[in-house]
Amino acid sequence: MAKLALLFLFALPLLLSLTSLLPLPCNAFSVDRPTDRRLLVLVDDLAIRSSHSRFFSSLQARGYDLDLRHADDPGLALRRYGQYLYDGLILFSPSVQRFGGSLDLAAVLDFVDAGHDLILAADSSTSDLIREIATECGVDFDEDPAAMVIDHTSYAVSETEGDHTLIASDDFIKSDVILGDKKIEAPVLFRGIGHSLNTANSLVLKVLPASPAAYSANPLMKLSSPPSLTGSAISLVSIVQARNNARILITGSLDMFSNRFLKSGVQKAGRSIKHEKSGNEQFVTEISKWVFHERGHLKAVNVHHHKVGETNEPSMYRINDDLEYSVEIYEWSGSSWEPYVADDVQVQFYMMSPYVLKTLATDHKGLYSTSFKVPDVYGVFQFKVEHQKLGYTSLSLSKQIPVRPFRHNEYERFITTAFPYYGASFSTMVAFFIFSIVYLYNK
Amino acid sequence: MGAKAENGPKPPPPLSSPPPFKALVKLKTKQQELLIRSAALALIYVLAFAIRLFSVLRYESMIHEFDPYFNYRTTLFLTRNGFYEFWNWFDSESWYPLGRIIGGTLYPGLMVTAALIYRALRFLTFAVHIREVCVLTAPFFASNTTLVAYFFGKEIWDAGAGLVAAALIAICPGYISRSVAGSYDNEGVAIFALLFTFYLFVKAVNTGSLAWSLASAFGYFYMVSAWGGYVFIINLIPLYVLVLLVTGRYSMRLYVAYNCMYVLGMMLAMQIRFVGFQHVQSGEHMAAMGVFFLMQVFYFLYWVKDMLNDTKLFQSFLQITLTCAIGVGTLALGIGMASGYISPWTGRFYSLLDPTYAKDHIPIIASVSEHQPTAWSSFMFDFHILLILFPAGLYFCFKRLSDATIFIVMYGLTSMYFASVMVRLILVAAPAVCLISAIAISATIKNLTTLIRKKSKAALTVSSKATSNLKASAKALLDQSLPFQQNGAIAVLFGAFYLLSRYATHCTWVTSEAYSSPSIVLAARGAHGGRVIFDDYREAYYWLRQNTPPDAKVMSWWDYGYQITAMGNRTVIVDNNTWNNTHIATVGRAMSSYEHEAYEIMQSLDVDYVLVVFGGLTGYSSDDINKFLWMVRIGGGVFPVIKEPDYLVNGEYRVDKGAAPKMLNCLMYKLSYYRFGEVTTEYGKPTGYDRARGVEIGNKDIKLEYLEEAFTTSNWIIRIYKVKPPKNRW
C-alpha cells in the first residue's frame, strides 16, 4: 500500500508536467464559440518566425494560441486519443517533402473534414505534398515548378524594372463578410505561383484573381510555347468553405504574409497614386478573421412550426392546414452571437420538389417567421431552409413532417349543391313507404 | 319453366343391415346417419386445421412470406389504436416520400376478422398474443370452409357429396398452399367468403327466399371487404344468371335472388373505401349492372305476355323491347366509357382474359412469379386425382342438370380457365374442383354400393341412369347376366379407395414438404443430411431495427418492402403494394444504373441504406440478381435510358466474365458481389464462384465510391449498404 502511494507521489509531478505541455482543451472550438483558439503553424524554416512576425503577432493579439513548429518536427500530431489538439492549421512550409510525426496528407485532410480550418501558402519551391493537399481542396498549382505569375500590366512599380513577378492586385472578391467592412484601398502585393480552380469543385472561390493580362511562366526563360495558365483563369488567393463549414485559404505566395510585404509601400503600374502601405496587412488580417470563423458564422436555433392558433408542434399536419414556421438565426461576431439580419432567408415545404417557397420575415432580433397553407397534397414533407450566401457558413435545416389527408369525419356532412339528391332519396323513401302501406292494406 | 330445382336433401340410402353398436340400436336410422355424418364432419373440421400446422411444428409460430407481414402490421395497429385510427391511417413509413393511405387502399376484412377473434379470446380471458391469432386465422377459416363445402355439396347434390367435398377440400393442396398456419393473407378468409357467398346465392336461387338472398348479399359484402377477388363473384353470378335466362330457366326465384343480392351487395360493397364507387363506375362491374337491367326487362316482358294473351302481338313487342333495351344499354355504356365516367378494364383484368397481355404491357404484373401461367405439373401437384375426377363430376352434373349444378359447372369451368392463366388462381378453382370431384366420387360409390347391396335381384331393375353413371369398368356390368357384377363392383370400390388414400398421402406430403415453408426462414439439407436453417432475413431486419436511426430510409426492391417496415420498423421507398409504377421504376433505374448515377437518384429520395438479397454464397436462387432483369424492364418502361439489351450478351443473361459491361458495373451487380471475389464458396472452385448461378463472377474487384458496406448477414443472403454523405470538400 505504501509502495503504491509512493509510486503515485512519484508519478504526480510527471503527469502535471505532461498536461501542462499539452494545449488545454477547455477553450477549444465549440458550437457556442465557433472562433478557433489553438493554431498549429508549420514552417520549413524557423526564420519565418521573425520574417512573418507581424502576421503572427496580429493573430496572437486577437487571442490565438500559436504553436509554431518545424514541419519535420518528429513530435507533430494533430490529434491524440481521438481529440484534436488544434482548431486550425497554418502551413507556411511550401517546400516540405514529408511532415514529421504522425502528420501526413490524410491526417491534414481528416483534420479539415473534422471541421477545422486551414491556411496553405505556397511559393515557387512548393513540394508535391503541398500540391497534393491543394489538389484535394480543389485547387491545382501550376505544374511547372519554376513558373511564377507574371503580369506586365498590373505589376508593382519599383526602382528596378524587374521581371514583373511582383504583382499589385486590387481586384478583390466583393464580399464584406470575407474581407471586412472597410474597403481595402491599397493593392495587395503578391509574388508567387498561380493556381487554377478545379471546375468540378463547386465550393472553391477566387478571392483575388489575376488580371486578364497575367500568365504563369518561368520568368528566367524565354517563352517558347503558350503558357498553360493565363489571364483570369489564374487565381492568386482562393478560399474553400467545405460542406461541414471548415474553411480553407490557399495562396501561391508565402511572401504576401511577410513583414516586408506588409510594411512596404506600393504603386500599381499605370496609376499615379502611390500608397504608403500595401493592402497586405489589412487583407491577410481580414481574411484570417474569416478563415478562423471570427466572421460569417451563422447558427439556427429554435426551429418551430405549429398550426395557426396553437403553440405545440404537431407530429403530423393535415392538408390545407394553416401553419406558422419560425427559426432564430444568429451570426457570430467574434465574441458574441448577434442577430442575423437578411431579407432573403427562405423556407421550402418540400416533397421531392418545393410545394411552397416563402421568404421569411424577420424582426431584426434574429427571429425569422412566416405562415402558409399546407398544399392539398399528402405525403412526407420537409421544412427546408437552405441559406447559402457568399462568405457565410451554409445553413441547411430540414425537418421532416408527414401531411395526412382528411379523416373520414372531417369532410362536410351536408353539401349545399347536393340538396337535390338528398331530397330525391328521402322523397323516394317516403314514397316507397306510402306505396307499401297502400299496396298491402288497400283491399 | 324448368322446375328442376327441388333439390332438398335426398332420402338417405336405406340402411337395412342391423347396426353393430348397442347404443345405436335405439336410434332410428335417420338419427344414426346424422350422428355419423356430424362425427365425420367434426373430424374433417379438426383435420383441416391440424394439417395446416406443419409449418408451426417445423419452424415456429411466425408470419410467412411478404404480404402477410403487412397484414400483420396493420392488424397490430388495429388492435392497438382502434378501428377509426385504422380507417384513417396515413402511413408515412412506406412509399417515402409519397406515403400511403392505408385505410383507403386495403381490404380490411382480414384484419378486422383477426382483431375480432382476438377481442373475443381476450374477452374469454385467453391471454393470447395477436400474432398467434394471425398465424392461426387461415387454418381456422379453412376449417370453416369445409363446413361450407359440406352444405354447398348438400345443396347441389346430396349430403354424401357434401361430406366428400368437405373431406376433399380439407386437404386439397391447392387450397392449403394459401392457408397454412402463418400464411396470414387475404386469401385465407376470402376463399371461405367466396364459397359461402356462392352457397348462399345458390340456396337463394333454389328457394327463392328473400332471406337467403339477403344473406348472400352479406356474404358478398364480407368477400368484398376481404379480397380483390370479389370481382370474380360479381362477374360469375351475372354470367350464371345470363346462362339461366338464355336456357329458359328464368324464374321468380332467380329474379328475387339476383336482384336482392345485387342491389344490397352493391350498396354494402360501396362502404369499403378501397372499392368505393367502382360498382357503378368501373368496367369490370358493368356486366352485373347490365344483367340487372336485363332482369327487369325480362320481368316486364313476362308481365306483358301475361296481359296480352296474343302470341303474335307479343312476338313483335318482344322484338321491339329487346332491340330498344339492348340499344339503350349499349348507348349508355358507350357514353359512360367515352365520357370517362366508367373506367376501362384494368390491366390485371385484361391479363386474366389474355395471358400474354401482362408480358407485353405491364412488366410489374408479369414479374411476380405467382402471376405466371400455370404449368401442367402444378395442376397435378395441387389437384392430384381431382384433376381426373373433375371431368367425371362434370359429366354427372350434366346428367342431372338443375339450377344448382349449372352454377357449379360454370364456377368450375371459369375458375379452371383462370387457374391456367395465373398460378395463384388455382386457389379459386380449388373449391369448385373439390365439389365437382366430390359429386363424381359420391355418385360412383353410391352406385357401386347400391349394386353390391341389392345383390343380384334389385340390381337388375336399377334404372339405366344409375348404371350408366359408372365408369368404363362399370359399363361392362351393364350386362345384367354377368356373374362378376358384384365382384367387379367391389374391385372398383377398392380402386376408388386406393385412389382416395393416395390422394390423402399426396396431400400430406405436399403440405409438409412444399407448402409449409415460411420463406422468411430458409431450410436446406446439410452435407450430412441434417437440416440447416438460414435465418438471414430476420437477422438483417433486426439489425436495421437496432442499428439505424429511426427515420432512416431503406431502398430495396419492392418485394422486401413490407418485411422491412414490419420487422425492421424503417421507412421504405417502395413496397409490395405496387400502386405507383413510376416510383418502383425509379428504384429499378437506380439499381440498374452506374454507381454515380444511382447516387443522384438515391440523394433525391433521401435514401440512407440500400438492401439487396444475394444468394450466391448459399445457392439461394430467388435473389435480386435473378430478379434483376425485371428491375431493368420495369425501370426501362418508364425511363427509356435503361435498355434491356445493355445487360444481355446475345440475348443471354450472364454474370460471369462474358457478361455485358453495363451489367458488370451496375449498382445491383456491385452491391451483390462486393467483396465476393475474395470468397471461396465451394471446394475445387475458384474464388467468387456463384453457387446460385453456377458460374465464377466476372467482376471480382469491385470498389464502391458512394456507398459503404454496413452489414452482411451470416450467410450473405442480405447485404445492407450505407449511402455516404456528399464529399466534404467538393
Image (tube, coloured by chain):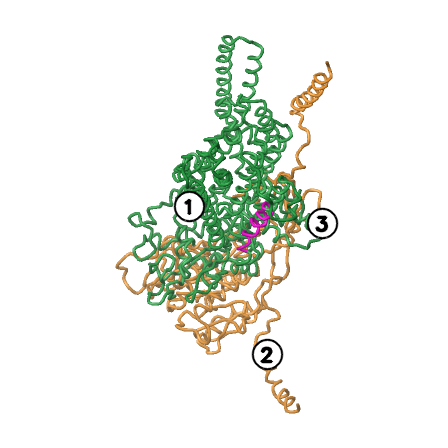
Chain colours: A orange, B green
Label 3, secondary structure: give it: helix
Q: Please state the chain letter of the residue tagged with numbered disc 3 in the rendered image.
A: B
The amino acid type found where label 1 is placed reads Met
Horizontal side, residue A235 vs residue B333: left or right: left
Determine the residue positioned at 49% across, 34% down. Answer: B411
Q: Is residue A344 visible?
A: no
Label 2, secondary structure: give it: helix
* Both labels 2 and 1 in a single chain: no
Instruction: Decide which of B416, B223 is in the foreground and name it.
Output: B416
Magenta-span inclusion, residue B53: yes
- Residue B30: name its quadrant: top right
Instruction: Decide which of B47, A135 is in the foreground and name it.
Output: B47
Q: Is residue A220 above or below residue A403?
A: below
Q: Which residue is mark 1?
A: B380
Q: Residue B167, which numbered label?
A: none
Q: Main secondary structure of the magenta part?
A: helix
Q: Please state the chain letter of the residue tagged with numbered disc 1 in the rendered image.
A: B
Question: Residues in magenta?
Answer: B40-55
Q: Position of residue B382 (x, y in %)?
A: 45, 46
The amino acid type found where label 2 is placed reads Thr
Q: Which residue is mark 2?
A: A19
Q: Quadrant of the C terminus of chain A?
A: top right
Indicate which label's residue lies in the foreground, 3 or 2: 3
Q: Are marks 2 and 1 in contact (CB under 8 Å)?
A: no
Q: Which residue is mark 3?
A: B123
